[in-house]
Image (spheres, rainbow, N blue to C red):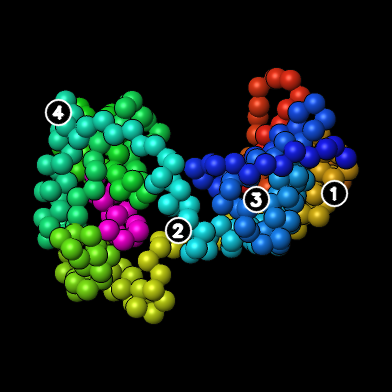
Amino acid sequence: MPLFDIRFRRFTSLNTTIRLREGRLHVSLSDLLEAAPESVHKAIAHILLAKLYRKPIARSHSDRYRRHVSSEAVSRQAEQIRQTRGRKRILTSKGHCYDLDEIFERLNFRFFHGLMGRPVLTWSEHHARRLLGHYDAAHNTIMVSRIFDRVVLGVFVVREQVVASQVATWTPPRSTVAGVGRSDTVRTRPLPARRAAAQFRIGLATAIRWVHRVRQTGDRTAGRQGQPRRSKLDPHRDYILGLVETTPDMTISEMLDKLAAERDVYAARATLWTFLDRCGLTFKKRPRTRPSRTARTS
């Protein structure tokens, strides 16, 4: 068993890492986890070691860790840490073609009757193509990719991206609008379902169903779309996990050959890859370097 070097560090988030260097395991934990219960520390140790040695993660440990980090107290502390330790690069809301402040004000009066407080709006530093825009609740900032700052796209596309980020400001930590809590303003002045359906251009039945769910459960998150995730490999789960246990370095092609020869099951590489991913057994490809492994809990 290698020696452990465990340290609590002033991270800006709850990310936790483990590295194997020269026969020693270097573990870095966020200082927010220092006062966590012993069961959480055991769950973190299990998750890190399982990922380091590419073993399945027990659901009990995964659920214990997630319950702790998603609790209201820890979430509030993490948000405060992001505000105090984190850095947000703010450039300008005035682009070459469009002004985000002007677009936000027009959308605010059109859809929210001018009741929503204006966050900080900024164009991104680079022409990002993967992350087109996001709302950062810790810094109350909407950032839009500069790829939209083009005449050829038209203001409609930019408006759609700002709306997507603007809607996310309905559920951030409380902030004020003219002395009134924003979240309180939205809740105490609700729109009728029929009027909301017409204003946001959605079906009336959908609006009624959403409002009913909020009143019954208080849940405002979007439900999962599509059919429940199933796989033709589910009945052979124990057999596949046994292959990984006995031969950890077995390739997907070799597993497919084993399934065909011993179980008469034929599947595509993508099917087996997705199945292993659901079991927490996919491995991140890393460049060839000196013996070192890094694993994260999120």
- x 55%, y 48%: residue: 14
Label 4 with label 3: CB-CB less than 8 Å: no
Sequence-first tag of 2 and 4? 2
Secondary structure at numbered mark 4: loop
Rendering quarter of residue 287: top right
Residue occupied by mark 3: 278
- In magenta, the rendered stretch is 162-175
The residue that disc 2 covers is 76
Q: Tell me where residue 55 appears, x and y as whole percent.
A: 77, 46
Q: Secondary structure at mark 1?
A: helix
Q: Amino acid at mark 3?
A: Arg
Residue at x 56% of width, y 57% of height: 69
Of the two numbered discs 2 and 1 on the same chain, state the one appearing first in sequence: 2
Quadrant location of the N terminus in the rendered image: top right
Residues under numbered marks 2 and 3 in contact, where contact means CB atoms less than 8 Å apart: no
Q: Image height check: is 178 above or below 285?
A: below
User: What's the mark number on residue 242?
Assistant: 1
* Residue under the image location 42 percent in, 52 percent down: 80
Q: Mark 3 or mark 1, which has the lower sequence index?
A: 1
**Earlier-in-chain disc, 2 versus 3:** 2
User: Residue 121 appears at what percent x and percent y?
Assistant: 23, 41
Mark 2 residue type? Arg
Classed neighbour count for the residue bearing mark 1: other residues with Cα under 10 Å, few (<14), some (14–19), many (≥20): few
Dot 2 and dot 4 residues touching (CB under 8 Å):
no
Q: Which mark is residue 97?
A: 4
